[in-house]
C-alpha cells in the first residue's frame, strides 16, 4: 500500500493531511534534518508533503526526493508566486499555499500518486457471498474516511449508486448535500448549464440557477455513467476538476466549490482510452480510489437486508418475508442485479396479503420477470 511522507512542524497541517489522504498511511517527521529521514529517500512508496521554511535544507531535500522519483508537494506558509517558482525549479511536483483545504490536498496527492503509478486501492471480485459483502463494506468504510475521488465500476444495476451513498453517509460530509447526475441523460447542449448553473439573462429565458457542482458544495456529487460523456463534456468537467472553480454560464466571475467526487460506469474506461473515446487526463482525475461492486449473484448474503431496505423505502415496513421466500430469492440468478431485486420487491409489496411474502408469492413474481433466467440451486 502506498504511503504519504509528511514533514511539518504544524499539528494542524499534519491533521489535515491525515484526514485528506485516508485510508493511506501517513509517516510524520518534523524536520528535514532528522537523521532517520534521509534513509527513506529511496524507499518512499508514495508522495511527500513538506511544509517549507525556505531553508537550504528544504531545497536540498526536495531535489534529493525528486531525483529518487518521489513527488514532493510543497506547502507555503503564505502565498508567494516567487517562492513557488523557486520550489518548482528545485523539483517540487506542486505547491499549495496555506491555509490549505482537505479537498485541495486530496486532489493534489491523487495526481502525484498517479504520476508515478503508485496508487492502487481496487477491490477485486470475490466469489464467496460473505467474503464479497464484507470486503465491499470494509472498503466503503476506508474510502469514507478520505476526500479522494472514488470511481465505482460494476454491472448495470449492481448497486453503484447505493455504494456511493454509503460512502457519503459514512463520511465527514454526511448531512451535507448528496447530488446525483446521470451523465448519459444530460443533453449535450445543456451539460454545462446543468453542471455549472446559469446567470440571469445568459440567454433567452435564462434565470439565475445553481448547477450541480454548486448544489454539492461541502457535500458529494455522484456522476453516474461517466463513460457516456462526449469529448466536449469531458473537457468541460476536467476544467472544473483542475481548479475547483465554477463559473455560471453568463457570469463574469467564478468561485471556489468544495465537493467530494464519486463517479461510476459499467464501461471499461481503460479500453475506452485506447480507442480514443475517453480522456486519459480525466481518467487520472477520477480514478484515484477505485471500487468494483460484484454482481448480486456473488452477494446473495446481502439479499435479506436489501429486501428489508427496499420494503421500508416503499413505505411497506410491515412487510415480512418468510424464510422460504428469502431462500428462493437467494437462489435466483438476478441478471438485473440490485435494480431487478428492487422491482421484484415492489411487485411483492403489491401482491402480499396481510404483508406476508411467501415462497409461492415469490415464485409468482419471478415468473413474470421478462428477462429472468432459470433458478439455480
Image (cartoon, rainbow, N blue to C red):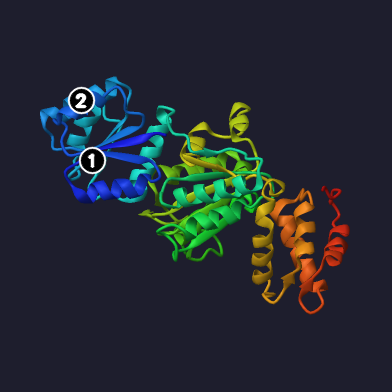
Q: Nearer the viewer, residue 321 or 125?
A: 321
Image quadrant in which the N terminus is located: top left
Which label was assigned to residue 75? Answer: 1
Give above or below for 246 relative to 215: above
> Dot 2: what SS?
helix
Identify the residue under disc 2: 38
Give above or below for 54 relative to 19: above
In the image, taking residue 339 as reference, residue 371 lies left or right, namely: right
Q: Residue at x 69, y 63 (%)?
A: 307
Give above or below for 308 relative to 52: below
- Give the image location of residue 150, x and y in percent: 49, 45
Is residue 193 something one can see in this rendering?
Answer: no
Residue 8 image-quadrant placement:
top left
Which label was assigned to residue 253? Answer: none
> Dot 1: what SS?
strand
In the image, taking residue 233 as reference, residue 345 lies left or right, namely: right
Give above or below for 228 relative to 185: above
Dot 1: few (<14), some (14–19), or many (≥20) neighbours within 10 Å? Answer: many
> Looking at the image, do the residues carrying marks 1 and 2 touch, with CB atoms under 8 Å apart?
no
Q: Nearer the viewer, residue 29 or 196?
A: 29
Dot 2: few (<14), some (14–19), or many (≥20) neighbours within 10 Å? Answer: few
Residue extending furthest toward the left: 55
Amino acid at each position: 500500500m502506498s504511503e504519504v511522507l509528511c514533514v511539518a512542524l504544524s499539528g494542524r497541517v499534519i491533521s489535515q493531511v491525515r484526514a485528506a489522504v485516508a485510508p493511506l498511511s501517513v509517516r510524520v517527521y518534523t524536520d528535514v534534518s532528522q537523521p532517520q529521514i534521509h534513509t527513506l529517500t529511496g524507499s518512499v512508496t508514495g508522495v511527500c508533503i513538506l511544509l517549507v521554511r525556505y531553508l537550504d535544507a528544504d531545497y536540498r531535500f526536495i531535489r534529493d526526493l525528486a531525483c529518487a522519483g518521489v513527488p514532493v508537494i510543497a506547502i507555503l506558509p503564505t502565498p508567494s508566486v516567487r517562492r513557488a517558482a523557486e520550489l518548482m525549479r528545485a523539483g517540487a511536483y506542486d505547491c499549495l499555499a496555506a491555509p490549505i483545504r482537505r479537498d485541495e490536498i486530496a486532489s493534489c496527492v491523487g495526481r502525484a500518486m498517479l504520476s508515478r503509478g503508485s496508487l492502487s486501492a481496487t477491490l477485486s471480485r470475490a466469489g464467496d457471498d460473505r467474503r464479497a459483502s464484507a470486503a465491499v463494506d470494509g472498503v466503503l468504510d476506508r474510502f469514507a474516511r478520505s476526500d479522494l475521488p472514488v470511481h465505482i465500476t460494476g454491472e448495470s444495476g449492481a448497486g453503484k449508486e447505493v455504494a456511493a451513498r454509503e460512502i457519503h453517509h459514512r463520511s465527514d460530509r454526511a448531512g451535507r448535500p448528496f447530488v446525483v447526475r446521470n451523465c448519459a441523460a444530460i443533453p449535450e447542449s445543456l451539460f454545462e448549464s446543468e453542471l455549472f448553473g446559469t446567470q440571469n439573462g445568459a440567454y433567452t429565458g435564462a434565470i439565475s440557477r445553481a448547477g450541480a457542482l454548486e448544489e454539492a458544495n461541502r457535500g458529494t456529487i455522484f456522476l453516474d455513467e461517466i463513460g457516456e460523456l462526449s469529448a466536449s463534456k469531458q473537457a468541460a468537467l476536467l476544467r472544473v476538476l483542475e481548479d475547483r472553480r465554477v463559473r455560471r454560464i453568463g457570469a463574469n466571475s467564478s468561485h471556489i466549490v468544495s465537493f467530494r467526487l464519486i463517479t461510476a460506469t459499467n464501461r471499461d474506461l481503460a479500453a475506452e482510452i485506447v480507442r480514443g473515446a475517453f480522456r486519459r487526463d480525466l481518467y487520472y482525475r477520477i480514478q484515484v480510489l477505485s471500487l468494483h461492486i460484484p454482481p448480486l449473484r456473488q452477494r446473495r448474503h446481502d439479499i435479506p437486508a436489501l429486501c428489508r431496505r427496499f420494503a421500508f423505502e416503499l413505505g411497506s415496513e410491515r412487510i415480512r418475508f418468510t424464510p422460504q421466500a428469502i431462500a428462493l430469492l437467494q437462489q435466483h440468478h438476478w441478471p438485473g442485479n440490485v435494480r431487478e431485486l428492487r422491482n421484484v420487491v415492489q411487485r411483492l409489496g403489491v401482491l402480499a396479503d396481510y404483508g406476508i411474502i411467501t415462497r409461492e408469492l415469490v415464485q409468482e413474481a419471478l415468473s413474470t420477470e421478462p428477462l429472468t433466467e432459470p433458478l439455480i440451486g
